[in-house]
Image (cartoon, rainbow, N blue to C red):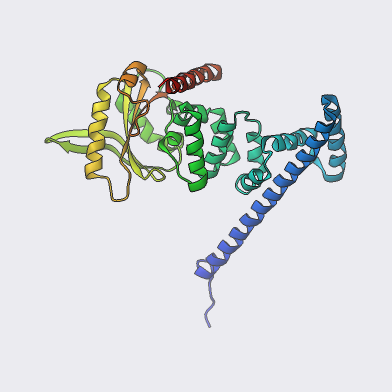
Amino acid sequence: MSDITLNNSELLQSIINLIDTSRRKVALNINSELTLLYWHIGKEINNNILKNERADYGKTIVKELSKNLTKLYGNGFTKQNVYNFVKLNETFSDYEIVHSVSRQLTWTHLRSLIYIEDDLKREFYIRMAIHERWSVRIMQERINNMLYERTAISKKPEETINRDLQLLKAENKLTPDLVFRDPYFLDFLGLYNSFSEKDLESTILNNLQQFLIELGSDFAFIARQKRIVIDNEDFRIDLLFYHRSLCCLIAIELKLGKFKASYKGQMELYLRWLERNEQRAGENKPIGLILCSEKSPEQINYLMLDNDEHIKVAEYITLLPTKDVLEEKLRKAIYLAQNSSDSK
């Protein structure tokens, strides 16, 4: 009888899959149980401190608890970690919420998220981390790069933000406002001095993986300089992508300098052509993203592009400003957008 080699057999792969799946489930269960334990510890401390209503008393409790628990159970109960347990319980006072989240994100994820004070902003990062399966490192990078403030959803009224986040939570569906950003960070391209639109496009293609990371998950690259013919005249779409969650084509036009009103007509032409010639059964209408080095707020406002579902205008930045300058710029943009919405 000849020897049987299992290296590439279906049986071996099936058993490997069973083992890996089981290990992932065990890891998830351990993480969830630990997170819930920390939540209960935080609740006990909060209840005890609230009864005494003295800040110095609370600090003493935490310090003594940490000292004793560390002796018994090791370094997982440092004073800072005990404070994290307290913060976890304060942030997620509803047990059912923390129970649900703990089965989808690790304690290390939550340890960062609980210090985001804005409820909607925190919920955004929770839902996006779950949907896009962010590692802790990726999530922290997104927070540091102010993804929430750059995403279109942050400029919408609170009820719109809540609605879109609940849709993502309940049905795992992204809306365009959760997908598109402004500005886009293209500092990885290394284009700091004068460059042409062709240079910009070529460098993006040479750094496509980084560009896709900046665009967000679910973007799939389709074509560069997509040729379309209208009235026997050639037109070309700079970049064409497909978004799996939105189920639609995404046409991207790259522009140097400020946004011009004529760009809208150009994009509308491209989108109508794609809708008629490339859109498949079951897909949604194409969306266009016009990337400019600078926006023209008044022109965009007059063209009513701020709330357009199918044409988005955003800036791209090839040289990042300081964090303080960026924070001020994004906060101002959010304030102006939200106040403009309220006045309508």
Residue that appears at 36% across and 45% down? 247
Give the quadrant of the C terminus: top left
Image coordinates for residue 290, horizontal then vertical, percent: 33, 28
Image coordinates for residue 341, horizontal then vertical, percent: 43, 23
Task: Determine whether 340 is above or below 35 in the image.
Answer: above
Q: What is the quadrant of residue 64 in the picture?
A: top right
Q: Is residue 258 visible?
A: no
The residue closer to the viewer here, 302 or 277, is 302
Task: Determine whether 183 is above or below 86 in the image.
Answer: above
Image coordinates for residue 133, horizontal then vertical, percent: 54, 44
The residue closer to the viewer here, 339 or 28, is 339
Q: What is the quadrant of residue 300 in the picture?
A: top left
- In this rendering, the count of numbered labels is 0
Tell which residue pokes out farthest to the left in this image. 232
Q: What is the quadrant of residue 243 in the picture?
A: top left
Residue that appears at 49% across and 32% down? 159
**Is residue 326 shown left or right of residue 228?**
right
Q: Is residue 18 visible?
A: yes
Image coordinates for residue 302, horizontal then vertical, percent: 31, 19
The residue closer to the viewer here, 97 or 285, is 97
**Is residue 308 shown left or right of residue 8?**
left
